[in-house]
Every structure is written in C-alpha cells, then in structure tokens.
Image (cartoon, helix red, strand yellow):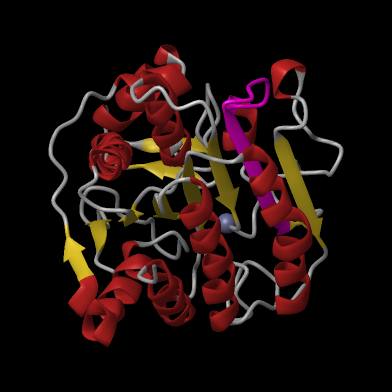
C-alpha cells in the first residue's frame, strides 16, 4: 500500500546547539536510507499546504506560545535546560505542528490511509504551558485535537513507544475520554512521570494507560505488553483513528535510552497497530517521529516500521 511521507527536518531553522543529540541528522539519515530502499516505490513524499492551526492554540496556552515566539524572535535562548530555540525555531515548530494537522486532514479526506511525519522539533514532552525535553509544540496532541475538534471524532488512540514518557500528551488529555493515551517507557527515567497509577482523572479516568518498564527491557516484554495490554485496551476502546508516537530511542544502540529493543521489534509493534487500525478505523494511522538519537539505529528501525505501515 502506498503511504504518505512528510519531512520537515528544520536543519537550518531549528539547528541543534553543538553536541546536542536532538539534531536534524538523526532523522534525515533515517529517511534518506528509507528512500534508497525498495520501500520507496510505495512512498509518496507530500508537501504540506497551509492549514487552520486553531488546534495548536487549543492544546497550548497562548501566553506560553507568545513567550516562546518572543524568545526566538529576540535572538533565541533556552526555554528549559534541554530545549534551545534559535531565532527561527518557533516558526519551525509551528510549521511541524501544522504539518501534523495537514497529515490528519489528508487521511480523513481519504487521500492516504497512513502517513509518516518526520518533523522537528519533536513534541511529546511539551505541556500546555511549557516546552521541555527538546519539545516546543506537542505535535501529537495537536493532531489528536484536530481529529476531535475539527473532524468530530469521539475516540482517538495515541500509542507512544518513545523510551521517555510523554508527560505533555498525557497531561493535555488527562481528564478526557475522547483521546486514549497509551505509553510504554523506561521508568524511573526522564521526565519522571508515567507510573501505572497515573490513569486519568474525571471523565478521563481509565483513558491513560502507562506501561513503565525497567532499564534494559527487550523485545519479549515489549511485544507481550502489546499482546496482553495494549491491543486488548484498543479493542475495548474501538479507536476511530490511531496515532503513533514513534520514537526509536528504546533501540538497543540508542545512546540515551538504555533499553534493548531490536530493529525488527519496531516492525512487530507496528504490525499489531496496523491490524488493529484495519479492524476498527479503516486502517487510518498517523505516525510521528519523536526521539531516537542514533541515526543508524533510527534508519533500521524506521525501515521495519514503514514496511509494516505499507501492509494492508
Ligand atoms: Zn525519547
């Protein structure tokens, strides 16, 4: 099956400070390799067009966005100890978040069943009123909110397998049941959240599923979690759309993650979600590149991820 690919590496507009792991190369190398593989025959590279970005302002505080914009436009600076904005980083972050909206709209229109967005800066640590952990705007949350607010969906599932807990995404939807947030992550680890006891609150009670895992966890435990916990939860929820937070920093060769996941396991996890999407929501999946700091490991993991996304 043909899938859509959007790349916004933002190498010039959102440059990494010297020695910083969140660089354009970690993504661009992986995508370059993907486009040299046989999978490229079934990939259409898309150029996002301008969209209504109202959902960026629904998942983030306007004062925070203005603050980030003014830090950037006045020459740049850090918005948290890990997160640097250059003069053009805010525009880059807005463009990447808008591309997530564009991708959702393209899938909802029926142009593509699946799209992969490789865009920087990443998003899942960005909270309602602050950026952190390399993240400025929560692209995943913006995509999910667009599905609910602009497309009227009532059940959107996010599965975030980045090695770090997506504190921002969790918090944004914590008291809602129209977005189910599922995360597998190393624990205890940055950013500190993601205990099993964090299950949502109010209407959102039971619509956050955290699967904290010890350092060094490998394929067996990840795949068992999909089989025994994640897929049953999704079958209960019957999502109308699936969003994947595809970080590849749980890979065994990642310099930051400390886990033991193989390239192929990213394919196996994808396969579970493809089958679930085919059962419940006409196969609709948007996958977003989050973390992943070894360009070579990212390339191998992305290959297996996309190979499964292309299957019916
Ligand atoms: Zn991460």
* Drawn side of residue 134 relative to residue 41, left or right: right
Q: Quadrant of residue 269?
A: bottom right
Looking at the picture, how far across and down is residue 200, in whole percent? 75, 28
| Residue 291 appears in the rendering | yes
Range shown magenta: 172-185
Residue depicted at 50% across the width and 33% down the height: 131
Q: Quadrant of the N terminus?
A: bottom left
The answer to whether 128 is drawn above or below residue 50 in the figure is above
* Drawn side of residue 57 relative to residue 186, left or right: left
The answer to whether 267 is drawn above or below residue 121 in the figure is below
The answer to whether 280 is drawn above or below residue 5 in the figure is above
* Drawn side of residue 138 relative to residue 117, left or right: right
Looking at the picture, how far across and down is residue 175, in whole percent? 67, 20
Residue depicted at 60% across the width and 58% down the height: 161
Q: Residue furthest right?
A: 197
Is 78 magenta? The answer is no
The answer to whether 168 is drawn above or below residue 309 in the figure is above
* Drawn side of residue 1 relative to residue 312, left or right: left
Q: Quadrant of ligand 1?
A: bottom right
Q: Quadrant of the C terminus?
A: bottom left
């Amino acid at each position: 099956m043909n899938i859509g690919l959007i790349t916004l590496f933002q190498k010039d507009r959102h440059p990494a400070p010297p020695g910083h792991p969140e660089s354009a190369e970690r993504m661009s190398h992986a995508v370059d390799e993907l486009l040299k593989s046989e999978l490229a025959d079934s990939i259409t590279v898309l150029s996002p067009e301008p969209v209504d970005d109202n959902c960026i302002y629904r998942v983030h505080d306007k004062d925070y966005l203005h603050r980030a914009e003014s830090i950037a436009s006045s020459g740049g600076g850090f918005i948290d100890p890990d997160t640097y904005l250059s003069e053009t980083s805010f525009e880059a972050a807005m463009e990447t978040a808008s591309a997530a909206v564009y991708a959702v709209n393209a899938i909802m229109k029926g142009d593509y069943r699946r799209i992969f967005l490789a865009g920087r800066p990443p998003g899942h640590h960005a909270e309602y009123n602050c950026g952190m952990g390399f993240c400025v705007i929560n692209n995943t949350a913006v995509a999910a909110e667009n599905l609910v607010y602009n497309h009227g969906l009532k059940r959107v599932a996010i599965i975030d397998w980045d090695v770090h807990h997506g504190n921002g995404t969790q918090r944004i939807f914590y008291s809602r049941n129209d977005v189910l947030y599922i995360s597998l992550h190393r624990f205890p680890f940055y950013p500190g959240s993601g205990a099993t006891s964090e299950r949502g609150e109010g209407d959102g009670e039971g619509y956050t599923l955290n699967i904290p895992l010890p350092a060094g966890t490998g394929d067996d435990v990840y795949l068992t979690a999909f089989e025994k916990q994640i897929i049953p939860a999704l079958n209960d929820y019957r999502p109308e759309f699936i969003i994947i937070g595809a970080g590849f920093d749980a890979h065994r060769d990642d310099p930051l993650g400390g886990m033991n996941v193989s390239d192929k396991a990213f394919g196996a996890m994808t396969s579970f979600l493809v089958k679930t999407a085919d059962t419940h929501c006409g196969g609709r999946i948007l996958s977003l590149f989050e973390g992943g700091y070894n360009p070579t490991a990212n390339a191998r993991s992305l290959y297996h991820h996309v190979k499964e996304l292309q299957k019916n």
